[in-house]
Amino acid sequence: MNIQPSLFPNHLAAPYLSELRTSAPLVHCMTNEVVQTFTANVLLALGASPAMVVSPKETAQFAKVADALLINIGTLHDSQAEAMLVAVKAANQAGTPWILDPVAVGGLEYRTHFAQQLIELNPAAIRGNASEILALDGQSSQGRGVDSADDTGVALNAAYRLATRYRTIVAVTGETDYITDGESTWSIPFGDKLMTRVVGTGCALSAVVAAFYL
């Protein structure tokens, strides 16, 4: 498969940012415990409103009133998995878009199985690094913990297949980001290695994707 991405024109981003700041979307972040504060601050800086509701007794109710839901499986455990499934099903019933961040799938069986279970529940978008996207597509990858050892270009075909198969948007991020919905494919070549030296940049980006899903 020979996919030729188009360079995303920067001037198109400004109207969406203005719209986000006007609407101040409420983003329900079920994210990993390492990055909760960082993620909340990134959303606040953008103009969105973050909320970290994590109890299985509350997630269904809150997913229905939020504007978007983020599911990040970085520090996955049984109670969190239960709460995430409850939230996703409630979001689907309410028409609330939800975004999947499949942190470190491929290397560990528990989270890989759970991510495959989640992807069948119709995420509005998937945001992951190259190794994670390859693993979701059922391919071998070279992830090292939560970090990718694969170039994003290697995962472009996998992203396209996932987008087509699940009728979703897939963003594979790294030095060059690629975004596809199975029809149009865009590239954004502004990544920097310094981002790999800050904990949570990818996780926060997934929350940003949720905020922009207006």
Image (spheres, rainbow, N blue to C red):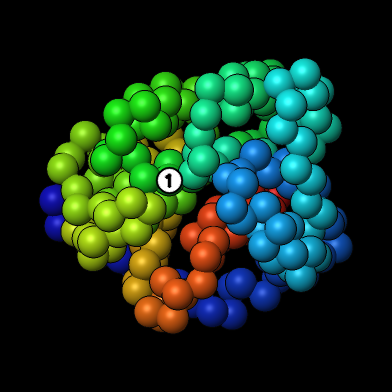
What percent of the width, then of the height, locates residue 206?
A: 55, 53
Q: Is residue 124 visible?
A: no
Residue at 15% x, 57% y is 2
Q: Is residue 61 visible?
A: yes
Q: Is residue 213 above or below residue 92?
A: below
**Observer-nearest residue: 69 or 83?**
83
The amino acid pointed to by label 1 is Val
Which type of secondary structure does the marked residue at label 1 adopt?
loop
Residue at 17% x, 40% y is 139
Q: Which residue is mark 1?
A: 103
What percent of the width, then of the height, locates residue 122?
A: 50, 28
User: Label 1: how many residues lie within 10 Å, few (<14), some (14-19) or many (20+)?
Assistant: many
- Lateral position of residue 204 relative to residue 158, left or right: right
Snapshot quadrant of residue 103: top left
Residue at 42% x, 71% y is 196
**Observer-nearest residue: 79 or 174?**
79
Q: Is residue 180 above or below residue 113?
A: below
**Observer-nearest residue: 159 or 52?**
52
- Lateral position of residue 132 relative to residue 53, left or right: left
What percent of the width, then of the height, locates residue 93?
A: 69, 19
What percent of the width, then of the height, locates residue 34?
A: 59, 53
Q: Is residue 81 above or below residue 171?
A: above
**Observer-nearest residue: 18 or 78?**
78
Residue at 27% x, 39% y is 106
